Amino acid sequence: MTTMDTPAPASARSQPLAPGTLAIVVRLGLIACIGVLLSSLSPGFATTDNLLNILRQASLLFLVASGLTLVIIGGGLDLSIGANLTLCACLSAAAIKSTGQPAAGIVVALGCGALVGLTNGVLINRVKIPPFLATFGMLWVAQGIAYWFMAGQVVYGFSPAFRFFGSGFWLGIPLPIWVMLVTGACGVIFLSRTTIGREVYLMGANEAAAVLSGIPVARRRTLLYVVSGLMAGLAALIYVARLNAAEPGIGEPLLLPAIAAVLVGGTSLFGGSGSLVGTLLGAIILTLIVNALNLLNVSASWHPFVTGVIVVVAVLADAAVNRGARR
Amino acid sequence: MTDQTVHATTVAPAALLRRIPGVTFILVGMIVLFAVGNPRFLSAVNLTNIGLQASLLLMLALPMTLIILTAGLDLSVGALLGLCGVVIAALLVAGWSLPAAVAAAMLVGLVAGAVNGFLVGYLGLPAFVVTLGTMGLCEGLSLVITNGDPIGGFTPVLEAFYRSTLFAVPTPVLVAATLYGLLSLLLYRTRFGNYVFAIGGNKDALHLAGINANLVHMGVYLLCSLTVALSALLLLGRTNSAHPSVAVGMEFEAIAAVVLGGTSFEKGQGWLFGTVLGVLAISVLRNGLNVLSVEPSLQVVCVGLLLIAALLIDRNRKQASRDIA
Amino acid sequence: MKTRHLRRIGLISVVACGLAASPAFAAGEVIAAFTKNQVDPHFEGVRAGVEQMAKKMGATVRQYVPTKPNNITEGMSQLEDVGVTKPNLVLFMPIDPKAQLPTIKRLIESGTPVLNYNDKAGDAPYLAFVGQDDYKLGYDIAKTLFDHLGGKGNVVILEGIKGSNTGDERKRGFDAALKEYPNIKLLASQPANFQRLLGLQVMENLIQQFSDINGVIAAADASALGAAEALKSAGRGNVPVVSINGVPEAVEAVKNGSLLAIAEFNGFKIGCVATEIGLKAIRGEVVPKRVVIPGAVITKANHTEWLVPYQQRTCPAAAEYVGQ
């Protein structure tokens, strides 16, 4: 049996095209509305500098959230991304400092990320520990190793060549935005143009059907966790290059915003539907909101509340759209 | 489905043994290890410490068990706990009486539970998403109310209550034990309890049987949020001040405790007493690591290893019993 | 076969945790030293100072740090748990003084001597307080910046964690200095929670909001370094940034010009002096109730002393600061 002639279980819930496109259009509309509103209220908003600033902040969030998006579409969850990022950042920063080679840091970061991801994947898909607990456990293990390795210190001061990835510009656009675009494009192609990508949607929407149609679900899901870990490693490199330092508190505050970006982007936690473009827009919306509140001089105490409202509104809007589509 | 759960309290010894979650063995192992490492671990003072530290987590984890039995979860409990604490403290400082302030907090809990319950129970939205949103709202509201500053200087009655004892047992432990008693009656002796198990197993079947399953589903979230609102009194008694972000993150520990206790995210399988064991395991581990003064970074690793190791044991026992069969 | 293997891994890990725990019960007093997190190098400085002085005076140190940074309830549990082990001396800094005061009072009542260091922890019968004047540090560094600006210009403040004594007192110091300079205008004051990433992102947004920032005051090094990065990549690296603490990384930034100046909040010295005073007190000597270590303003001209890693520094004698 091939994946193409499965008895269409996906149509039961996910309808990958029509509502998905609509969701993205709605989000683009929302961004445009906020944009128009802000540029009339605050002259500082619609400047190239500010827009690039928003995109650069969003790109860091997107990199953390992109791997998580894949995992969630495939029917899993990864709570360890933040701690994984911390560990990769600390280890790779130390590697760069001790060898003087950015390449060593890149190898270490990606290797560490993939290893943590692989451990998650094996615990979840071979030992069959629920994703929530396995990755929550890994969160503590990775964080603890990072504390132990750093021993209260900060690794800082990197060569301009390495820092270019975080704070450099190419064609007038900050490097993290390029990294976001390239990885985003790779991810979109992976999800929509490859067999494995389509299998990811299928096994997220209906695991039983995926097994019946011969998809090696355990192996595919493990692969997704490895990819999520790799993305955490890549994000770690960008963060280190951007901040010019690695410390063991770097990743922990990123977990909930990353999950929020995925959700605001319209990816369903039931698995089987969602997209990286959505997550990209989700990251932009969340960053835009904070930027807007700042430009409007709203006290920082309001940021979490407004973010919460956005998450709830996005979820409700999707629910309404899905109901409409079902009728 | 309902038949199985009716007999849930009267299982054969062998089945009971099988039901004991893997974390129990680790719990026993840890107690032995810590007691050998430092005899004072088993002293009355330290057991009181463990009881006090476990009671608040238990207050969150017990109703969370019911939610997880319905194949859901509630990420908002930590933030809601903080918000209710802030509401009570702010109103007390503003001159309200304690009962009125608590009533206001209960109202906050009611609203939060109703929102969660309606969106999850009636609209069928994923609990993770809904409660993540309400978590943000609750945390945000506490920040807005306090402007980030802790609120202190309210009635010392709360701290006195928290520190009081009855027959040498701290009151918070008794409160948590009472909650356990009430919830196990509710879960194992009433039809509501049967429905809770059934929602996780097969909600549609419940609908077909003519039961308002959506209402039951919403009821579980209401129950949880109201318990959280009441628990805010314990939190205030413990910290003697209300801090907007003090309890953020506790929701993850509560969920971990429930799952350690053998309640699974799927199919309405679980055991309320298992949650007590799960909470005890986490509390004993954290206490023991401090009593033995384990190196701080290792402590962090140990928490993660406890979670993974306990579930590894569970998995292996399930595998083993399947091999025998 | 495989299952047994896995079970063993589980057991070994638990046992390993236990064994790693039992430090040699050396002769001399046991000191339980509390710090707030494992992230900020300032606290590593404190821990290093405590270790060095304890070793010199023949005592053993056990470090307690909450597993989650600055977690209040965890900090309280650790105090309760440490009470059980009956250390000879507790060195305590509050994460939140209001919340932790009742617990620390009970600990003292149960007969454990407690010395308060680093952050003031409310009113309780401590052996002594050893720390610095956060208000003055805030005041001094704000003045340093304002004088550098010639007494006029627009500044922004990156605050610390609200509710922490350190954060609130420093902010009070900034505000007091602001009052003395009528031509200095405060554009915005936002929390950066002593964090680097938050400092970076808050600064990035402030740069967009205000085109005319002349100076930045940060409540701690990490957020100052983040802010300096943001300014540099916006092409405004010439905007002076000042901060408080003086961890080696920040001092290096003073050396290369990314930061203008730092008010010295010296964790290492605090750790050393607190340990010396505490041990002397429990050995029966009369000690001062309050030792306030003065903080220098670290600039390019005098920075070398603070570049030395904590492990290679030598503890000052407490006598240097007594009576000041």
Image (cartoon, coloured by chain):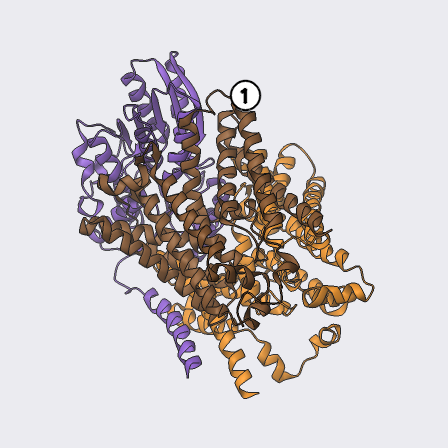
Q: Residue at 28%, 45% (x, y): give it.
A: A154
Q: Which chain is purple?
A: C
For image coordinates 54% across by 78% down, the residue present is: B318
- Chain coloured orange: B
Going by the image, does A213 lie left or right of C148? right
Residue A166 in the image: state x and y as whole percent: 32, 40
Depth check: give the residue in front, B201 or A30: A30
Mark yes or no: residue C64 visible: no
Hey, which residue is sitting farthest front in the picture?
A5
| Shown colour of chain A | brown
Circle 1 is placed at which residue position?
A40
Quadrant in which the N terminus of chain A appears? bottom right
Front residue of C291/A143: it is A143
- Name which quarter of the figure residue C6 lies in: bottom left
Question: Mark 1: few, some, or many residues within 10 Å (few <14, many ≥20)?
Answer: few
Residue furthest right as drawn: B210
- Indicate the quadrant where residue B184 lies: bottom right
Q: Position of residue C184 (x, y in %)?
A: 38, 15
As drawn, is B7 to the left or to the right of A223? right
Tell me the chain of label 1: A
